[in-house]
Amino acid sequence: MANCLIAYFSREGNNYVNSRIVDLPVGNTEVAAKIVQRLTGGNLFKINPVKKYSTDYNTCTKEAQKELRENARPELTAYPDSIELYDTVFLGYPNYWGTCPMPVMTFLEKLDFSGKTILPFCTHEGSGMGRSESDIRRACPRAQVEDGLAIRGASVKDAGKEIERWLKNHGI
Ligand SMILES: Cc1cc2nc3c(=O)[nH]c(=O)nc-3n(C[C@H](O)[C@H](O)[C@H](O)COP(=O)(O)O)c2cc1C
């Protein structure tokens, strides 16, 4: 399935994994996105806000909470050249405060996903997909938003089989 896009947001730096703060040189969602890429042959696109979140975990949680409260749409550094080429868009993100990070909402609202299938996947530390799927459906009313895959951040490196099963369930 080469004509799919794998768009994801992921943050490297300090994070909370299995009740401890650890330093992740590569974010959990990025690890998952690269597994999806390997299994599908699609094109990767990283969603980057102009103003990066702090690498400090506690500061980042405050920044993200403020954005959520304000329903912010942080500016992104870039967008894919064209999404017309893609019928299927995988959308990866960490669960932030029960939903997707606000830069992901910017991405969804700036582009036209009409007629496309969106397959969300998230990494998390216990809350699963949260309310992210319904938030994505609201942002992209003309897309087919499938049920997502929630991957525990701490075990993302071993998620290959789980991701493979999810893809199979969606006929990919
Ligand atoms: C700002 C922030 C908010 C978070 N909120 C939640 C949450 O509500 N529920 C949850 O299960 N995990 C939460 N987490 C944990 C992340 O979802 C988890 O560590 C994820 O794997 C990080 O992905 P990344 O390394 O790709 O950025 C939060 C982490 C951060 C930094």
Image: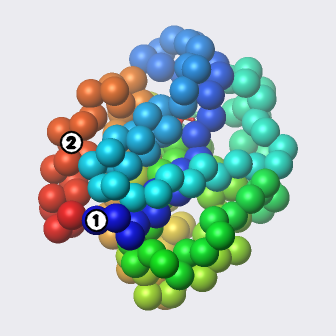
Label 1, label 2: how far apart the Cα atoms are: 18 Å
Contact check, label 1 and label 2, Cβ < 8 Å: no
Residue 32 in the image, given as x and y percentages of width and height: 40, 40
Place residue 38 in its image quadrant. Answer: top left
Q: Left or right: where does residue 139 sit relative to residue 123? A: right
Residue found at x 30% / y 55%: 40
Is 111 in front, or is 57? Answer: 111
Residue found at x 64% / y 52%: 47
Q: Amino acid at mark 1?
A: Met
Rendered-image quarter of ligand 1: top right
Is 78 in front, or is 106? Answer: 78
Local crowd at mark 1 within 10 Å, few (<14), some, or many (≥20)? few
Residue 13 in the image, given as x and y percentages of width and height: 65, 22
Residue 94 in the image, given as x and y percentages of width and height: 52, 42
Earlier-in-chain disc, 1 versus 2: 1
Rendered position, 7 above or below 58: below
- Mark seen at residue 1: 1
Q: Amino acid at mark 2?
A: Glu
- Looking at the rendered structure, the secondary structure element under dot 2 is helix
- Residue 14 appears anywhere in the view: yes
Local crowd at mark 2 within 10 Å, few (<14), some, or many (≥20)? some
Place residue 157 in its image quadrant. Answer: top left
Q: Left or right: where does residue 56 sit relative to residue 8? A: right
- Mark seen at residue 154: none
Instruction: Tell us which disc is closer to us: 1 or 2.
Output: 1
Is 128 in front, or is 78? Answer: 78
Q: Left or right: where does residue 66 sit relative to residue 160? A: right
- Residue 130 appears anywhere in the view: no
Q: Label 2 CB, ligand 1: below 8 Å?
A: no
Residue found at x 55% / y 75%: 83
Q: Residue under label 2, please give it.
A: 162
Rendered position, 75 above or below 142: above
